[in-house]
Amino acid sequence: MEPVTFATPDDAEHAFYDAFSRGDLDALMVVWSEDEETVCIHPGGARFNGLAAIRESWKQLFDAGMKFNVRVSNVIKTHSALIAVHSVLQHISVEGDDTIAPPLITTNIYTRGPLGWQLLVHHTSPAPDTNGLMMQESPRTVH
């Protein structure tokens, strides 16, 4: 696949989640930085370091044959000239399964390089049972 330039971290994030939803491994891997220190942590899973290990982890997921519906909400962004951090809630369901899964807490870290913005770290964890407190953007009262 040809190199793709992402003008903003949001462009890279959109491309990542679009490829995830379509189960398109090649499109998903284009989003990743070619930095040797790339890291991907799937919910409750191991840490994968480097593009070969990350690619294999996603390949196994996609090869299972499930189609995923992925929606992102509650995005919190921090940006500087060369790095961007997005904290999001991922809502993932499997096509054909009516089960409503709790959201997953995800941190995506993007770096800006010669090919624009690319994903350096994708870390997803199961959300703790907080009875909806996670959905608040920030506390309203500080004690």
Image: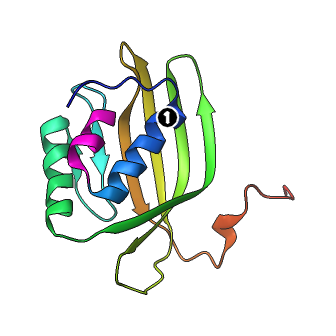
Q: Is residue 4 above or below residue 21?
A: above
Range of magenta residues: 24-31
Callout 1: 10 Å neighbours few (<14), some, many (20+)?
some
* Residue 30 magenta-highlighted: yes
Figure disc tally? 1
> Which percent across, then down, holds residue 80?
59, 21
Q: How is the image coloured?
A: rainbow
Q: Nearer the viewer, residue 75 or 71?
A: 71
Quarter of the image where one finds residue 28: top left
Q: Amino acid at mark 1?
A: Asp
In terms of image quadrants, where is residue 114?
A: top left
Q: Position of residue 18 (x, y in %)?
A: 40, 50
Main SS, magenta residues: helix
Which quadrant of the view contains residue 62? bottom left
Instruction: Say left or right for 95 vs 104.
Output: left
Q: Position of residue 92 (x, y in %)?
A: 43, 68
Quadrant for the N terminus in the image: top left
49 vs 68, left or right, is left
Instruction: Residue under label 1, please give it.
Output: 11
- The structure residue drawn at horizontal position 34% and vertical position 54%, both measured from the top left corner, is 20
> Which residue is pictured at 24% across the width and 71% down the height?
66
Viewer-proximal residue among 47 and 12: 12
Q: Describe the element under mark 1 as helix, strand or loop.
A: helix
Q: Residue at x 32, y 57 (%)?
A: 22
Residue that lies at the very extreme toward the top in this rendered image: 114
21 vs 64: above or below: above
Residue drawn at (43%, 86%) of the image: 99
Residue pushed farthest bottom?
98
Pinpoint residue 136: horizontal percent, then vertical percent: 73, 63
Front residue (pair 61, 124): 61
Instruction: Assess whether residue 65 is covered by the magenta stretch.
Output: no
Q: In which quadrant will I find the C terminus?
A: bottom right
